[in-house]
Amino acid sequence: MQHDEVIWQVIRHNHCSFMAKITTGNFCRNPYNVTGICNRSSCPLANSRYATIRDHDGIFYLYMKTIERAHMPNKLWERVKLPRNYEKALEIIDKHMMYWPKLLVHKTKQRLTKMTQMRIRMRKLALKTREKIMTTPRKEKKREARREEKAEKAAVLDKSIEKELLERLKRGVYGDIYNYPVKEFYKVIDMEDQQAASEDEEEEPEIEYVEGYEELEEEEDIEDFGGLPNCKSYPDFDDAVGTDDEDEESLAVERKRVRKDSQRKLEKDEPGSKLKKKARVLVEVEHEDTEERQMAVQ
C-alpha cells in the first residue's frame, strides 16, 4: 500500500537522489517534476495523483499518473500527445484533467506555456547565423609542428643520400652490376633526358657557307640576248593603255615571243661560254615625260 506522507518524510528528511541543494533553495532533477522545485506539492514520487508535460523530439506529451496503476510500474504513466497548436493543446489538458486539483492543472498549463516559448526561441536561433567559438588545441599544434620538423629533416637526409649514391654510381665505385629500384631508375633517366634537352637548346646555331654566284650568271645570260624589249618599239603604247584592254593582251603576247627567241639563242651557245664572259653593269634610264624605263647594257 502506498502512503504519500510517509514517502515524503523519508525523501525530505533522509535522502533523495533527485534533490539538488544550493544556496538559493532545493531543486529536483526528476524529469517528471512539473515545476523543478523540491516541495510537497511538486514531488512526483510523493504524490499518487500527478500530471506533467514532457518533450520528445519537439513533440509535447501530457503524462498522468493515478493511484489505480501504482501496482504496475510498467503502466504507471498515461501519455497523451498534444497538438502543435497552443490553444488546442490547452483544450486537451482541460478535457483530460477536468476533475483534477485546480493547482495541478494550473501548473501543467504553465509548463506547457514555458515549453512552447522555449521551442519558438529555439527555431529563431536555428535560423540565425552565429559565430561558433572553438578552443585551440595547443598540444595537438605542438605535436604536429614537431612531426613536420622531423619530416623535413628526414626528407633532406634522403635527398642527400640519393645525391651521394648517384655520384658514386657515375664514378663506378660499386662496379657494373646493380639492383636498381624501377621507380628511381626511370626518375634518373628522365632527369638525364631533361638535361640533354636543355643543353641542345643552349647550343649556338651552326654557320654554313653557300655559293652565291648562280643568280648573277643567270642575269648575265639574259643580258646577252639584248635584254627586255624597249617600250619605244611600240609607238602606240601610251594610246593603247589608255583606250582598250585588248592592246595590253597583244603586248603580253609579244613579250612572250621575245623571251622564247632569247631562250633559243641560249641553247645554240656553247656551254663553256658563261665562264669567259665578263661582268656587265645594268643601267636604268627613266624618262619623266613618258614615265618609261629603258634597260641599257654597257
Image (spheres, rainbow, N blue to C red):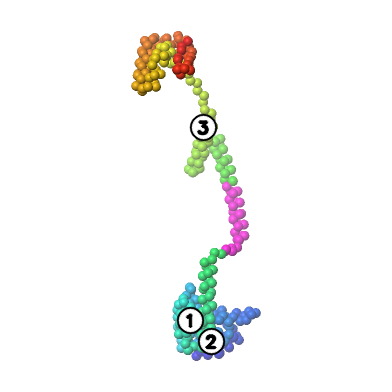
Residue 256 in the image, given as x and y percentages of width and height:
36, 17
The reply to whether callout 2 and callout 3 are in contact (CB within 8 Å) is no
What amino acid is found at the position of numbered circle 3 in the picture? Asp
- Tell me the distance, in whole angstroms, between the alpha carbons under discs 1 and 3: 93 Å
Q: Could you say whether the residue bearing mark 2 is in a helix, strand or loop?
A: helix
Residue found farthest to the right: 23
- Residue closer to the observer: 152 or 137: 137
- Residue closer to the observer: 223 or 33: 223
Q: Which residue is mark 3?
A: 200
Q: Which residue is mark 1?
A: 90
- Tell me the distance, in whole angstroms, between the alpha carbons under discs 2 and 3: 101 Å
- The boundaries of the magenta stretch are 131-155
Category of crowding for the residue at label 3, using alpha-carbon neighbours closer than 10 angstroms: few (below 14), some (14–19), many (at least 20) = few
Residue 271 in the image, given as x and y percentages of width and height:
40, 11
Image height check: is 209 above or below 157?
Answer: above
Query: Residue at point 56% right, 42% down?
Result: 162
